[in-house]
Amino acid sequence: MASNNTTPRKNIVILGASYAGISTAHYLLRHVVPKLPNPDQYCVVLVSVSSQVVCRPACPRAMISETAFDQKKLFVDVKECFVAYPAGQWRFVLGRVKDVDLERRMINVMGDDEQDHLAFHALVIATGASTPSPLLGLNGSSEELRSAWHEVRVALPAAKNIVVAGGGPAGVETAAELAEHLNQTGSKTTQITLITSANQILPNLRSSIANQAQKHLTHLGVRVLTDTKVTATSPIDAGTSSALTATTTVHLSNDQTLPADIYIPATGTRPNTAFLPPALLSSDGRVLTDAHLRAPLAGERIYALGDASTFARPAIHNIFSAIPILCYNIHNDLLGVEGEDKVFKEDTRETQMVLLGRKRAVGAAMGWWLPGWVVRMIKRDYWLWTTPKLWSGEQWTRGLRLRAGK
């Protein structure tokens, strides 16, 4: 990579090119930079370890079959998302962030055995989080995700026992998709077990909805174990990239063990923030973020959003609600305006929609229970139908009214 030290432009750098990062970039390019006094002085720079973005919620179904979704819609090149903007207004840097020098306001990015020293005027940390299983998210490149899916697809026909650990949406949807795919003949030749340490699956939903989901899973042939923790696995790295389809013994908190031809850990995520000083992070590794979506401990004009931030509970709808607030405050900071910040307030009402294969679903929105058919209609293809407008920026055609620059 070429060094960016000599550029006269002021870089607004966004670390991460997924839902939060791409949305922030579009909003800035559409509504913020054009209204600055000298817009040609700014460049929006996206940094990502992957050249492609994926519809992450679709992973539970996409992992099972390459024909489940149109691959050209499922995976989209990041650069293609920004072809509508002049090249000088934006830049894409492919690589992994090694570290950030907050004092010098420099970012070291490693890629293709070269290092890029990237200066920033403003910085948005939107690096997201990695999943314990390489099947359930874009932890690295899109090629690595496709390779993991291929390995599991080859192993599925011979699998007699599959264990999924984690009772959240990812674990529940994965178990349901596997059961529907493998046991669709009604013979139920594959034993699929879903394990959760909570007293119910889908703990963010009321018990009546969670119980309905468990009934659907039982109908599909999934055995559900609640109040049970996975204490260890043999081999220790079972379910990771190095032992993705290894024959595994799963040790449980009730002193029992389960055999698994395939073990899928779906027990939460790990924020991608290892490149940051620990003093900036909460106890769970997320960037400490205030109500204005700034990272106050990091310095001026530094912000955080998405799964790498403490701004809200990790959820895509929270990101969408926060984007206009974040960009409004970035605009004011770039102008040096004080006292006119907007505050992000999370909507904490019960909102979660979960597909249980192609025929069943449960969920709630803004505190209201939703019939299964409504959830299936809205989340019919795991939100893939929503991504074209999101990746292209059409999602952000309208923006908040901003102060005119002078």
Image (tube, rainbow, N blue to C red):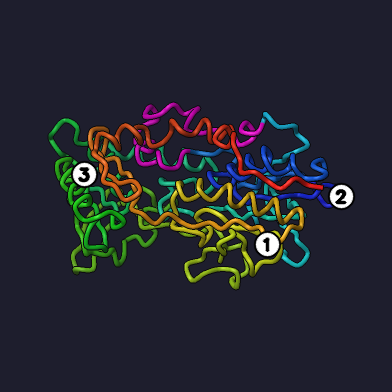
Residue at image position (50%, 48%) is 321
Q: Which residues are magenta?
A: 55-82
Nearer the observer, 89 or 162: 89
Q: Earlier in the sequence, mark 2 or mark 1?
A: 2
Side (left or right) of 157 relative to 111 = left
Q: Which residue is mark 1?
A: 339
The kind of residue on which mark 3 rests is Lys
Q: Residues within 10 Å of mark 3 (few under 14, many from 20)?
A: some
Can residue 240 be seen at all in this image of the molecule? yes
Q: Which residue is mark 3?
A: 160
Quadrant in which the N terminus appears: top right
Residue at image position (64%, 43%) is 401
Q: Is residue 73 magenta?
A: yes
Q: Earlier in the sequence, mark 3 or mark 2?
A: 2
Image quarter of residue 98: bottom right
Nearer the observer, 86 or 196: 86
Residue at image position (39%, 59%) is 237
Image quarter of residue 177: top left
The kind of residue on which mark 1 rests is Gly
Q: CA distance from mark 3 to mark 1?
A: 62 Å
SS type, badge 1? loop
Side (left or right) of 213 relative to 71 = left
Q: Residues within 10 Å of mark 1 (few under 14, many from 20)?
A: few
Please give the count of numbered marks on the rendered protein: 3
Q: Which residue is mark 2?
A: 6
SS type, badge 3? loop
